[in-house]
Amino acid sequence: MISPCPVRGKSLANKEEAPGKPPRFTKSGRAGTEFGMVEFKRVSYVFGSSWALKDVSFTLEKGGFLFLTGHSGAGKTTLLRLLYAGLPLHRGRATVAGFELHKLRRRHVPELRRRVSVVFQDFKILPQRTVFENVALALEVRGVTRQHMERRVRAIVRALGLESKSYTRCAHLSGGEQQRVAIARSMVVNPKLILADEPTGNLDADLTTDLMNIFKQFHSYGATVIMATHNRTILNMVPDAHILHLEQGQVAETTLPVEQDEPHTEGLL
Ligand SMILES: Nc1ncnc2c1ncn2[C@@H]1O[C@H](COP(=O)(O)OP(=O)(O)OP(=O)(O)O)[C@@H](O)[C@H]1O
Ligand SMILES: [Mg+2]
């Protein structure tokens, strides 16, 4: 059992937004973008002449858990790449963790990525570096002080059950252990939003359950999670999760509340 991982008396994920501006409300009383962690409005992306995503709209609240499902080629990875500004929007509007992607300037991308963590299947850990070094790297590039960094890395490595391997080179770890190192590296930065692309691919049933428990734990501390998966059994492991099912780049089905386009009433009231 992986125990919760407090860092300086706080959980790893952000339970609450840092105190700051109160949520904005529009005239109609709907919460502004601070409430929705992700808001997509008719977002499209085209590779060459074929639409990888077409008119995708959805809103995921802060602290939500969303599974992206759909056949191979449906657009799951493309959607995740848009979410961390790995690809630009070709059409539509999107807000992610308070950033408007359709207006995002290149210089603001690193700021967005400080709030968003990505766990890909082809995790790129450095095989000749130790577990500790691999995880620490995520904080080093952010200029965190050595003392703070050590504390954070130790806490997350312990939480993911890798403490006894802290000083082992990653080349000498099993596949599942390497995957946990990649997750530790993504999570050590306290992300508000965790994006995971088939993170349980190639894992056996036990490791899949362990891994899902890790994601659930971060979710229970307040992180918002979006996970693309083909694996139907993991959908049942997070009963309160939403599902967004893509078919040929379009939303075919979703358990998320579907918002109707608001009528243009400005000037009429
Ligand atoms: N770099 C690329 N160049 C051209 N087309 C691409 C590129 N990447 C993806 N596509 C196309 O975009 C569509 C969506 O691909 P995407 O990778 O998002 O699907 P996916 O749902 O993640 O599939 P899988 O389950 O196989 O990972 C597919 O038709 C794919 O062929
Ligand atoms: Mg994919």
Image (cartoon, helix red, strand yellow):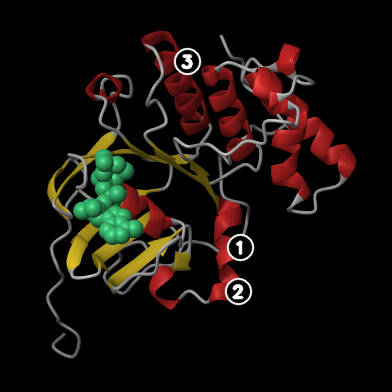
Image coordinates for residue 231, horizontal then vertical, percent: 26, 25
Q: From the viewer's perspective, tell me whether residue 256 is left or right of residue 203.
A: left
Asked if the residues shown at circle 1 and circle 2 are in contact, with their CB atoms under 8 angstroms apart, the answer is: yes
Determine whether the residue tagged by mark 1 lies in a helix, strand or loop.
Answer: helix
How many neighbours does mark 2 have within 10 angstroms: few (below 14), some (14-19), or many (20 or more)? few
Disc 1: which residue:
110
Disc 3: which residue:
210
Amino acid type for the residue under numbered disc 1 = Pro
Disc 2: which residue:
107
Image coordinates for residue 17, horizontal then vertical, percent: 57, 50
Q: Residue furthest bottom?
A: 267
Q: From the viewer's perspective, tell me whether residue 181 is left or right of residue 103.
A: right
First reached walking from the N terminus: tag 3 or tag 1: 1
Q: Is residue 59 above or below residue 242?
A: below
First reached walking from the N terminus: tag 2 or tag 3: 2
Gap between marks 1 and 2 measured at Cα: 7 Å
